[in-house]
Image: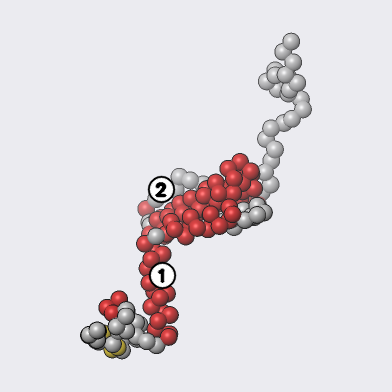
Amino acid sequence: MAPMPDAPKRPCCICRCWFRPDPRIGSRQRACGKPECQTACRRKKQQAWRQRHPDYFIARRIQDRAKEDRRPEPLRLPLPLSQLPWDIAQDQFGVQGADFIGALGTLLLRAAQSQFEAYVPDTAGLPDTLPTPTAQSQTRPVRESVRVGTGNEAGVSSTGSAL
Ligand SMILES: [Zn+2]
């Protein structure tokens, strides 16, 4: 058997030093033989793959959680999504359904936030039509505007007896 021709030397994708690829791997070897370069190169490839397939990891996480014997805690989601009763979502849609809705909400929230960050508002040119919320109005207790009990103001009985 003829010996394999040596692959030409090439620069390591991490440390840039020139190395001769392992003939069994050939041109697919992108990092030199140093363990730290091998690890860094593997991590770089995984990261690139993850960026190209974001749905894979969301799907895997949802499927793993649905496989657990006991019902997992609802996903910990950022505000304002965390204000929703996710245990009810789990009851109604199942663990997978609730996780999917949570993942959907998180994606939309991130997209909205990145839009918001890209937009720098020019507040100087805006007409002042909206009341500016003040600290006072935020701390003021909410008054009950609906009176319960008498039911006579509009001639409607609160008991609803129309008979
Ligand atoms: Zn290297």
Instruction: Say if 126 sits above or below 36 in the image.
Output: above
Task: Tell me if 97 is positioned left or right of 51 in this view.
Answer: right
Name the residue at 40% across, 75% down: 42
Rendered image: mark on residue 127: 2
Instruction: Say if 23 sits above or below 145 in the image.
Output: below
Instruction: Pinpoint residue 123: horizontal percent, then vertical percent.
Output: 41, 55
Name the residue at 30% across, 76% down: 28
Q: Nearer the viewer, residue 69 or 22?
A: 22
What is the crowding at mark 1: few (fewer than 14 residues within 10 Å), some, or many (at least 20)? few
Residue 8 visible from this viewpoint: no
Instruction: Pinpoint residue 13: horizontal percent, then vertical percent.
Output: 32, 81
Marks 2 and 1 sit apart, C-alpha to C-alpha, by 50 Å
- The answer to whether mark 2 and mark 1 are in CB contact below 8 A is no
Q: Say what amino acid the circle numbered 1 marks.
A: Gln
Quadrant position of residue 129: top left
Q: Nearer the viewer, residue 138 or 17?
A: 17
Rendered image: mark on residue 96: none
Name the residue at 77% across, 27% down: 149
- What residue sits right under mark 1 in the picture? 46
Query: How many marks on residues?
Result: 2
Q: Say what amino acid the circle numbered 2 marks.
A: Pro
- Image quadrant holding the C terminus, namely top right
Residue 88 visible from this viewpoint: yes
Task: Give the SS element for disc 2.
Answer: loop
**Sequence-wise first label, 2 or 1:** 1
Task: Tell me if 124 is positioned left or right of 144 in this view.
Answer: left
